[in-house]
Amino acid sequence: MAAVALTKDTFKPSIESGVTLVDFWAPWCGPCKMQLPIVEELSGELEGSATIAKINVDEEPEIASQFGVMSIPTLILFKDGQPVDKMVGLQSKDALKNKIQGQL
């Protein structure tokens, strides 16, 4: 299963229950291109236990500014609608998986 692409309309319902990792990215961002396959892989591995999502900051700038995203990639981990962790820059799959599993 691929990471879910979120918009301002789908964002809130997607994060309001359970554990959700959101990858803030843009197509022109080099490190984002390296992060995306890791995020997609996690989506498959954690299917059913956590939601893995992505937001294109060029298309949804208001969500990015709402959470203070200044540089990308930024990954924010939400639990029941509340941000519990924020990681800026390229993250390893193991680091992300450990953080997600710590919230399950």
Image (cartoon, helix red, strand yellow):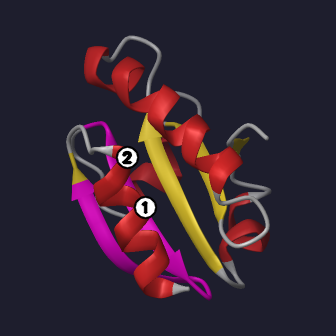
Query: Where residue 28 sits: x, y (%)?
Result: 38, 11
Residue situated in front as seen by the camera: 53 or 1: 1
Residue 15 falls in which quadrant of the image? bottom right
Q: Quadrant of the C terminus?
A: bottom right
* CB atoms of marks 2 and 1 within 8 Å: yes
Residue situated in front as seen by the camera: 100 or 14: 100
Q: Which residue is mark 1?
A: 97
Name the side, left or right, on which 16 lies relative to 101: right
**Predominant secondary structure in magenta?**
strand
**Element assignment for label 2:** helix
| Amino acid type, callout 1 | Lys
Would you place residue 6 above or below residue 81 in this image? above
Query: Where residue 86 sits: x, y (%)?
Result: 29, 66
Query: Where residue 74 sits: x, y (%)?
Result: 32, 48
Query: Can the viewer see residue 55?
Result: no
Q: Residue at x 28, y 36 (%)?
A: 72
**Element assignment for label 1:** helix
Query: Where residue 33 sits: x, y (%)?
Result: 40, 18
Q: Could you classify mark 1 by the number of other residues whose Cα lies within 10 Å: few (under 14), some (14-19), or many (20 or more)?
A: some
Name the side, left or right, on which 96 lies relative to 53: left
Q: Residue at x 36, y 71 (%)?
A: 99
The answer to whether residue 74 is magenta is: yes
| Amino acid type, callout 2 | Lys
| Number of numbered labels in the structure image | 2
The answer to whether residue 64 is magenta is: no
Would you place residue 13 above or below residue 56 in this image? below
Query: What range is drawn magenta here?
Result: 72-87
Q: Quadrant of the N terminus?
A: top right
Would you place residue 20 above or below residue 64 in this image? below
What's the distance in space between the residues labelled 2 and 1, CA to CA? Answer: 6 Å
Q: Which residue is mark 2?
A: 93
